[in-house]
Image: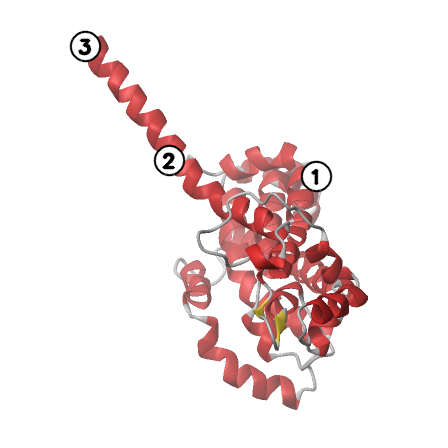
Amino acid sequence: MQTSSRTATILKRTAVVVAMVFAFFPIYWLIATSFKPFDEWASWPPVWLTENPTLQNYRIVFFPEAAREFAAAQQGSLDYKVSGSAWKAFQDSAIISTFATVLSVVFGTLSAYSIVRFRTGGENYPFQFLTVRMMPPIAVVVPMVALFAILRLSDTYFGLILAYTAFTLPFSIWMIRSFIEEVPAELEGAAMVHGMSQFRAFLTVTLPLVKGGILATALFIFILNWSEFLFALVLTSGKITTVTLQVANYVSASSGKLYGVQAAMGTISTLPVIVFGYLIQKHLVRGLSFGAVKR
């Protein structure tokens, strides 16, 4: 009995280790590639850990003169987009992702509260929201491009914020709805008996109780917005550049894709998400577990 139990424990731990290797290897490879020199980016056999680490890839990301030096060293040329600094891409992504996340969470919270407390739209109304998330974004890209061109929203902050908010709102509503359902309506009723309005009871009673869930939702929405590529590609034409577009732009006429520079850009672009998650970590565990068990 003890032998079988010990074997089962070993197998479970082995499975966890294997799963962790599969989960973390892409992250390791991304960081490792960002420090590799040009001749090790796509070498065979692959270089698992470079013996000649370099910061050249990070310099190309932020300093145009470093890109020109790289082009000269490779006896080739880089197009203009690659030689530009990535600062603007981070600035544009920060503005668009932050505002889109705030709008999605605010409207999602109000909509979820209306659905839970007032049964807005009936029992099947929440599922109708999910149909938007089930629809692949590519299916609506062409009409969106035409509509945004007519409204002159193409290649603008407001246009991308509107698009991101529209496609993350169903996810926001669905998640926050499950958190609000766990708060008994009797708590708000007691507050209203003492003279509070329905909206004030929501702000002072319900909202603090679901704060962790809202912050967890905000993190997921921010990740979706920060990593979005399709809408940024088709709804912009050069004036607005997001992080994902900047990564795709790292292509050299002589060297093809600049894998090391793309890896450096990808490594840096993960930092805002990590920082955001760290800042809300004390609310994150409760937020992710809140609503998991139905009453």
Residue at screen point 62% across, 79% down? 235
- Which quadrant, please, contains the C terminus? top left
Kind of residue indicated by mark 2: Val
Give the spatial CA distance, label 2 vs label 1. Answer: 30 Å
Let me know if residue 231 appears in the view.
Answer: yes
Kind of residue indicated by mark 1: Leu
Kind of residue indicated by mark 3: Met
Give the spatial CA distance, label 3 vs label 1. Answer: 46 Å
- Give whichever of 255, 32 is nearer the camera: 255
Give the spatial CA distance, label 2 vs label 3. Answer: 26 Å
Please provide percent x and percent y for residue 253.
61, 77
Let me know if residue 111 appears in the view.
Answer: no
Question: Relative to 34, does residue 130 appear above or below in the rendering?
Answer: below
- Give whichever of 154, 238 is nearer the camera: 238
Q: Earlier in the sequence, mark 3 or mark 1?
A: 3
Q: Earlier in the sequence, mark 2 or mark 1?
A: 2
- Which quadrant, please, contains the N terminus? top left
The image shows a total of numbered marks equal to 3
Looking at the rendered image, the disc whose residue lies closer to the viewer, 2 or 3, is 2
Residue 18: assigned label: 2
Residue at screen point 61% across, 48% down? 219
Please provide percent x and percent y for residue 101.
65, 57
Q: Circle 3 is placed at which residue position?
A: 1
Determine crowd level at label 3: few under 14, some 14-19, many 20+ residues with C-alpha closer than 10 A.
Answer: few
Q: Secondary structure at mark 3?
A: loop
Residue 279: assigned label: 1
Q: Secondary structure at mark 2?
A: helix
